[in-house]
Image (cartoon, rainbow, N blue to C red):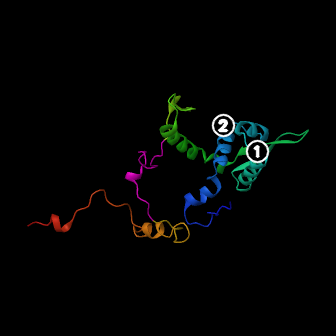
């Protein structure tokens, strides 16, 4: 089955998913970011065919998410190391992990825990506002138009919906209806 590329869609989620939407790619990045970096170890851990793994790794290197670094000269051997772009996928994986732990963990609990080394506490990742540090949810956020927004494949309905919200700041939390609030 041929996959439709999403790299031309004016949506950051679509473009990121074009690279990262494959389950194996997410698991490869999980492994590399926690320290499994050698081809044979990745093959063994994931149970993935060598051909599929090689293709996914090549794409991640091509996209600048991973780099190959030599760890042995004779015979030459290389391992995969996350670049800055790759390391910045970690919060995405943590958010996906937190969602999976909430909705798909087995009765015994989640398969892994996260310790925040700075404070030493076990933690549950949250996506938070960079200004006030409150968690972000669908109920308390609004998507507004950005400078790269456009209507096209993948945004034919969404693009105009977001554009209609205008480029001003966020909607006020409460609005006053001038007709209802006028004195009688």
Residue in view at x 74 percent, y 56 percent? 62
The magenta stretch is 126-144
Main SS of the magenta part reads: loop
As drawn, the residue found furthest toward the left would be 184
Q: Which residue is mark 1?
A: 49
Does residue 65 lie above or below 175 as drawn? above
Residue 37 visible from this viewpoint? no
- Tell me the element at label 2: helix
In the image, 131: left or right of 33?
Answer: left
- Which badge, 1 or 2, comes first in the chain's sequence? 2
Identified at 58% across, 44% down, the residue is: 93
| Residue designated by label 2 | 34
The answer to whether any part of residue 146 appears in the image is: yes
Q: Residues within 10 Å of mark 1 (few under 14, many from 20)?
A: few
Q: Residue furthest right?
A: 74
Counting from the top left corner in percent of width and height, residue 177 is at: 21, 65
Identify the residue at image location x=73%, y=54%. Answer: 59
Q: Quadrant of residue 4?
A: bottom right
Instruction: Report the side of 160 relative to 8 (left or right).
Output: left
The C terminus, quarter of image: bottom left
**Residue toward you, 30 or 52:** 52
Which numbered mark, 1 or 2, is in the foreground of this view?
1
Q: Quadrant of the N terminus?
A: bottom right
Position of 114 with respect to 178 (left or right) is: right
Please check the rendered image and state whether residue 128 is part of the magenta-colored stretch, yes or no.
Answer: yes
* In front of the other: 87 or 163: 163
Disc 1/disc 2 C-alpha distance (Å): 21 Å
Q: Position of residue 143 (x, y in %)?
A: 44, 60
Tell me residue 155's x, y (percent).
51, 67
Q: From the viewer's side, name the closer residue of 65 and 2.
A: 2
């Amino acid at each position: 089955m041929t996959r439709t590329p999403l790299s031309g869609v004016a949506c950051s989620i679509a473009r990121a998913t074009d690279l990262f939407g494959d389950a194996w790619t997410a698991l490869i990045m999980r492994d590399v970011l926690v320290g499994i970096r050698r081809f044979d170890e990745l093959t063994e851990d994931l149970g993935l065919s060598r051909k599929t793994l090689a293709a996914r790794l090549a794409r991640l290197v091509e996209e600048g998410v991973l780099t190959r670094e030599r760890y042995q000269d004779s015979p030459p051997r290389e391992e995969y190391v996350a670049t800055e772009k790759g390391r910045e996928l970690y919060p995405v994986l943590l958010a996906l992990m937190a969602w999976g732990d909430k909705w798909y963990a087995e009765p015994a609990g989640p398969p892994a825990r996260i310790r925040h080394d700075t404070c030493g506490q076990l933690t549950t990742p949250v996506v938070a506002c960079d200004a006030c540090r409150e968690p972000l949810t669908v109920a308390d956020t609004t998507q507004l138009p950005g400078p790269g927004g456009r209507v096209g494949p993948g945004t034919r309905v969404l693009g105009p919906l977001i554009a209609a919200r205008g480029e001003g700041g966020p909607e006020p939390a409460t609005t006053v209806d001038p007709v209802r609030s006028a004195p009688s």
